[in-house]
């Protein structure tokens, strides 16, 4: 489990299964920026990176996910109090987010998605 940073409502939880039931999971507190390439699921048994199928954000958590390490590549933003099945959500290149997350930034405030603004402006 990640270190608690001061806001108990700023968190994201990833699961390796869509139903979020008894599958492996990992909880991160924020605000934080994280490469998850070497992170294990809570309790061990494999890596989080490239294996997340569902995410849930806390009441004070907004997350930007990336399909490359160091918060690069395709990205998407999920709002606070969101539960998302990642295979149902597509990135800008048209692929879904299932098993694609390699890094993320977890915010404790709303985030404005900049890329759609740039795409529509130029």
Image (cartoon, grey):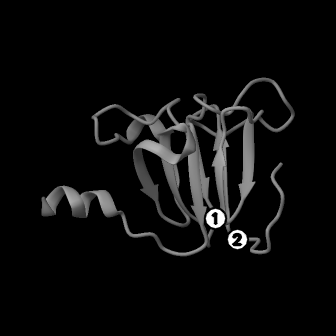
Q: What residue is shown at x 65% (from left), y 49% (from top)?
A: 34
Q: Could you say where residue 94 lies in the image, as x and y percent from the top left?
A: 28, 34
Horizontal placement of 57 versus 110: left or right?
Answer: right
Residue 100 x/y as whole percent? 50, 32
Instruction: Give the number of callouts.
Output: 2
Judging depth in this view, the residue of 64 and 83 nearest the camera is 64
Frontmost residue, 64 versus 20: 64
- Residue placed furthest toward the right: 43
Residue 9 numbered mark, or none:
2
Judge by depth and name the residue closer to the eye, 115 or 101: 115
**In the picture, which quadrant includes the C terminus?**
bottom left
Name above or below for residue 39 compared with residue 4.
above
- The residue positioned 41% from the left and 51% from the top of the image is 76
Quick one: label 1, few (<14), some, or many (20+) residues within 10 Å? many
Sequence-wise first label, 2 or 1: 2
Callout 1: helix, strand or loop? loop
Please tell me the numbered disc located at residue 87. Answer: none
Query: Residue 103: x percent and y percent?
Result: 58, 43
Q: Are marks 2 and 1 in contact (CB under 8 Å)?
A: yes
Q: Name the disc covering residue 58, or none.
A: 1
Q: In screen coordinates, is 99 left or right of 48?
A: left
Could you classify mark 2 by the number of other residues whose Cα lies within 10 Å: few (under 14), some (14-19), or many (20 or more)? Answer: some
Residue 45 in the image: above or below residue 118: above
């Amino acid at each position: 489990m990640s270190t608690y940073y001061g806001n108990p409502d700023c968190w994201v939880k990833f699961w390796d299964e869509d139903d979020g039931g008894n599958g492996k999971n990992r909880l991160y507190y924020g605000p934080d920026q994280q490469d998850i390439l070497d992170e294990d699921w809570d309790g061990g048994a494999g890596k989080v990176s490239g294996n997340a199928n569902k995410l849930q954000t806390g009441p004070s958590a907004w997350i930007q996910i990336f399909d490359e390490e160091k918060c690069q590549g395709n990205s998407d933003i999920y709002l606070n109090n969101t539960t998302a099945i990642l295979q149902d959500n597509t990135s800008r290149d048209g692929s879904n987010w299932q098993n694609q997350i390699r890094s993320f930034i977890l915010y404790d405030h709303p985030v404005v998605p900049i890329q759609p603004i740039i795409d529509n402006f130029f």
